[in-house]
Image (cartoon, helix red, strand yellow):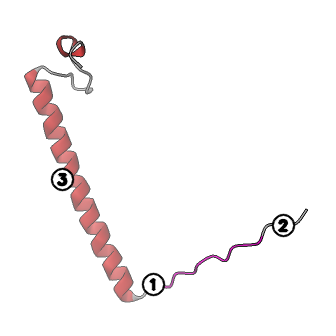
Amino acid sequence: MAEPKKKFERILLMTDADRAHLADWEQAADAHMARIMVSKETALQDLVDAGICDPDGQLSERYRGVA
């Protein structure tokens, strides 16, 4: 039985500019995720305050039949 051809791995050489760009991108991504999580937590708290769901995110008995 013949062995499959080996695929050559691509070797990535990073320059200082590449590292700086990647660091900027990671920082922007982290900031974006932090904003999303705050928005998600705020939205969930608003739903809990309105009595639509519990803190675990489950719909309250009143709204289960509607969904």
Which is more N-terminal, label 1 or label 2? Answer: 2
Q: Which residue sits at x=57%, y=81%?
A: 11
Element on which disc 3 rests: helix
**Disc 2 or disc 1, which is closer to the eye?**
2
Q: Position of residue 55 (x, y in %)?
A: 22, 26
* Picture coordinates of residue 47, whole percent (x, y): 13, 28
- Identify residue type, mark 2: Glu
> Are discs 2 and 1 less than 8 Å apart at CB?
no
Residue at 42% x, 88% y: name it: 15
In this rendering, the answer to whether 20 lies above or below 66 is: below
Quadrant in the picture for residue 48: top left
- Residue drawn 74% across and 72% down? 6
Report, in whole angstroms, how far the alpha carbon at label 1 lies from the one at label 3. Answer: 30 Å
Report, in whole angstroms, how far the alpha carbon at label 2 lies from the one at label 1: 33 Å
- Reply yes or no: does residue 9 show up in magenta: yes
Residue type highlighted by circle 3: Arg
Q: Is residue 5 left or right of residue 49?
A: right
Residue type at tag 1: Met
Give the left or right position of residue 6, taking residue 60 as reference. Answer: right
The CA span between labels 2 and 3 is: 50 Å
Q: Residues within 10 Å of mark 2 (few under 14, many from 20)?
A: few
- Marks 1 and 3: CB-CB under 8 Å? no
Image side of residue 14 versus residue 26, left or right: right
Q: Residues within 10 Å of mark 1 (few under 14, many from 20)?
A: few
Question: What residue does disc 3 label?
Answer: 35
Dot placed on the residue nearer the N-terminal end, 1 or 3: 1
- The image's mark for residue 14 is 1
Which secondary structure is most common in the magenta stretch?
loop
Instruction: Specify the segment rendered in magenta.
Output: 5-13
Which residue is located at x 17 percent, y 46 percent?
38
